[in-house]
Image (cartoon, rainbow, N blue to C red):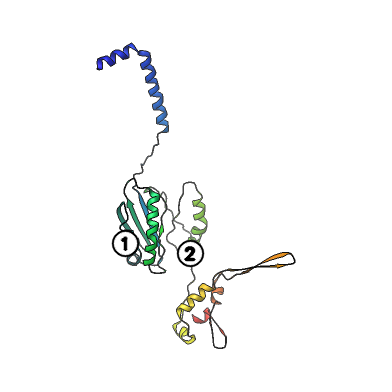
Amino acid sequence: MIKRIIDASLDNRLLVLVLWLLVVVLGVRSMGALPVDAVPDVTNVQVQILTNSPGLAPQEVESFITFPVESAMSGLPKVEEIRSVSKFGLSVVTVVFDEGTDIYWARQLIGERLMAARATIPQGYGEPELGPISTGLGEIYQFELQSETHSPMELRTLLDWVVNYQLRSVPGVVEVNAFGGELKTYQVTLDPAKLTSHGISVGQVFEAIEGNNRNVGGGYIVHADEQYLVRGEGLVQGLDDLARVVVARGERGTPVYLENLG
């Protein structure tokens, strides 16, 4: 058999040369189109569930957030593994699916189970959300903002509202995760004695702040062939606006402001 191949090759030298050149050309062309990666991505099919809960210690994050999310994810089809990490103010639950599972189908299943998970997490402890579609090599860079003239709160605000949006405009960047610093918040410290004297509960204070911190539309007014929009502006812009929120009224209609309760 081998002797026949050798004899046929010697008798058809031109054909063998043409075939050899064809193989060389196809090989060079394939080599140019071959994807080359210095670090090949071997990440399995996984979906991450992230929950931010500032202020909670790892023990509370594990008990009130991570465990309910893991329990809701149990029993899903084609799940190979469920693992989690509970940090200060952050819960990360990773659901690993069998190789070859469609990532969008897997995310749909996780999204349906998240509704049940949210119902078991105490109110105010954070909302679990799906992480971006990325791989184990997706986190490409970590950085921190430092300044001798700006406070941690100012740096966090700068990161969330300036740096974040500029980085997300870079092609290939899916998400920018911010962690640390101090979020800008307004804290209301209530005096129990003043609440009792005015007959006001903490729930009433919550409702008053929520109801007085929004803008509403009032339609429009037509006058002399012109249209004027009517809107009520009630968003809190600072501490002064928050202090003047009316929580309740006394027997004679005297307003009780939020600043009178702290």
Across and down, in percent, residue 46 comes to 35, 51
Tell me the distance, in whole angstroms, between the alpha carbons under discs 2 and 1. 35 Å
Q: Please state which of residues 3 and 151 is positioned toward the viewer in this rendering.
A: 3
Residue 120's place in the image compared with 202, above or below, is: above
Q: Amino acid at mark 2?
A: Met
Instruction: Specify the label residue 257 is tagged with.
Output: none
Residue bearing mark 1:
71
Across and down, in percent, residue 109 comes to 37, 55
Across and down, in percent, residue 130 comes to 41, 56
Q: Quarter of the image holding residue 9?
A: top left
Of marks 2 and 1, the one in the foreground: 1
Check disc 1 and report its element: helix, strand or loop. Answer: helix
**Is label 2 in contact with label 1 (beta carbons under 8 Å)?**
no
Check disc 2 and report its element: helix, strand or loop. Answer: helix
Q: Amino acid at mark 1?
A: Ser
Q: Quarter of the image holding residue 32?
A: top left
Q: Quadrant of the N terminus?
A: top left
Q: Please state which of residues 55 and 26 is positioned toward the viewer in this rendering.
A: 26
Residue 70's place in the image compared with 39, above or below, is: below
Query: Is residue 64 in view from this perspective?
Result: yes
Across and down, in percent, residue 193 comes to 45, 85
**Is tag 2's residue or tag 1's residue first in the polypeptide sequence?**
1
Q: Please state which of residues 249 and 175 is positioned toward the viewer in this rendering.
A: 249
Residue 42's place in the image compared with 112, above or below, is: above
> Crowdedness of circle 2 by 10 Å Cα count: few (<14), some, many (20+)?
some
**Given the current orientation, which residue lies at the most extreme bottom position?**
252
Instruction: Specify the label residue 153 is tagged with.
Output: 2
Q: Name the residue rendered at 32%, 12% in the picture.
A: 10
Q: Quarter of the image holding residue 144?
A: bottom left
